[in-house]
Image (cartoon, coloured by chain):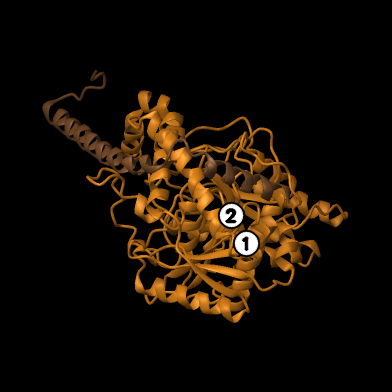
Chain colours: A brown, B orange
Amino acid sequence: MLEDAPRDDEELRVELERRDAIAESTRALLADLRALEILETLDLEPVTNAKRWWLDAGQE
Amino acid sequence: MPGRNDELCALSLSDVSQLIARRAVSSVEVTEAVLERIERLDPALNAFVTVTSDLALSTAAQADAEIARGAYRGPLHGVPYSLKDLVLTKGIRTTASARILADWVPDTDATLYTRLASSGAVLVGKTNMLEFAYGEIHPDFGPALNPWNTDFGTSGSSSGSGAAVAAGLGFGTIGSDTGGSIRFPAAINGIVGHKPTYGLVSRAGAIALSWTLDHLGPMTRTARDAALMLDVIAGHDPADPASAPSRPGGYAAHVDRPLRPLRLGVAVPEADDALVPEVQAAYERSIETMRGLGHTIVEFSMPEPRLVVRALLAILYPEATSIHLKWLRERPDDYAPNTRTRLEIGASVPGTVYLRGRRAASVIVERYRRVFDNVDVLLTPMAAYDGYLASDPPVDPVSKTGDRLGPSMRMSGPFNVTGLPAVSVPSGVSSRGLPLSVQFVGKPFADGQVLQVAHAYQEATRQHVPRPAGNPYVV
């Protein structure tokens, strides 16, 4: 797992702290991104409208 | 008193182009002036990673010879410019301001560079940037510093590009914009930055950060200059899968047409936008300027501001990591710490979250379509502040609330997610002597109209003209 393992205890401590911080930040980010779940997956109208707007603009 | 070299370098692209075209000044003379200015000022600004002096002088000599025999190629012929150092240039080092690419010399050209070279424009160098355009300065390259006050940063990620144009080290440059990286450094350095409609300008041969969000576009001192560059770089390119069909160009001609009265949608700022009072006041003056030009003001709320930032991050993180995965495995220690951290976080974003981000982007486009039912062009604040000290620590992506970068993209991010054309324009100077900015946004492919409005605003305010007295850097 730790193929790039640090060489001594201090380096190991710093690296583990770094990985802990990243894990915590990732959890926070993913929790925040759960807000994206409010979108109704089966409602295609916004996607269709957005695409049509873009295509119409491209043809003007 | 500025010398002749400095006077030449302070001209707009449009003006120097006309002088070169009628041979009132030679391209070699202008290029030598720019190179001399780079040599004199860039040690303090660090805007350039590579200066291509020999290439520039030979290209300029060729331009002069062609123009002398009547083979004029167009408004960029003989005009010195630069490229952000993520645009591939055959035979010229392309680093993305990253240790990983410090010695890389590509054997191909980006489509955009090919087009600029064909126009006869004179490449004077490759500009410094945030590492791989992803949020942090790599210590091997150091920060570009703000010509308005070298104690201050340039924003990014097209940081050297912003500093170079503000300092007269070339008449235009090309930046890239994934979450605001053309418009923020344009705003903070007091120049114009245009993020074109998604698909209008080919990204083929530029080092990608996020295929869904990346845009390449011009950074200049005026909107008209941006239109002149856009005329050259826009157009279909089969090498970029997102490239739109070719469209009629004529962006500069569009800018020169009289502007008919418009319905101008003006964003009502929210507390979360965190505008400093001087930005708020300058924004309100901008609204009154546009009203005074005869446009109808229609207030609107920027749709789904929090959803926009979440969608952007849900797309950006995994796309960036997928691009960097090989280097992340093989050379993790060669990244700047925050770049590496962001890439590692991106490896943990599930596919479901990414796809919800992509889907949210469509919903956000639909929300903006509804806004544009009632207006022609939008006006928003751009940077929420006037600047930051270069010595301030970088934005740490490790946070108990997610990435702190997100909130800063509330004004810029919507137009990466939607792909709508957006241009940042100077709107004044703060009490600290630093530039303020606003942003105009248009419908898909209405780049000509957006630049036309920005041009009219610049002509009315002349905010790009008054320069700080006694400042040796800003032109």
Disc 1 target residue: B450
> Dot 1: what SS?
helix
Q: Quadrant of the N terminus of chain B?
A: bottom right
The front one of B455 and B93 is: B455
Q: Earlier in the sequence, mark 1 or mark 2?
A: 2
Q: Position of residue B39 (x, y in %)?
A: 53, 56
Q: In the rendered view, would you say B367 is above or below B453?
A: above
**Residue farthest to the left, as pictured:** A9
**Residue farthest to the bottom, as pictured:** B292
Q: Are marks 1 and 2 in contact (CB under 8 Å)?
A: yes
Q: Please tell me in which quadrant of the rendered image residue B429 appears.
A: bottom left
* Disc 1 crowd, CA 10 A, few/some/many (<14, 14-19, 20+): many
Q: In the rendered view, would you say B215 is above or below B371?
A: above
Q: In the rendered view, would you say B341 is above or below B251?
A: above
The front one of B18 and B93 is: B18
How many circles with numbers are drawn on the protein?
Answer: 2
Indicate left or right for B247 with B437 as reference: right
* Disc 2 crowd, CA 10 A, few/some/many (<14, 14-19, 20+): many
Q: Quadrant of the C terminus of chain B?
A: bottom right
Chain at tag 2: B
Q: Position of residue B360 (x, y in %)?
A: 45, 43
Name the residue type under label 1: Val
Q: Please tell me in which quadrant of the rendered image residue B93 appears.
A: top right
Q: Position of residue B274 (x, y in %)?
A: 34, 64
Disc 2 target residue: B421
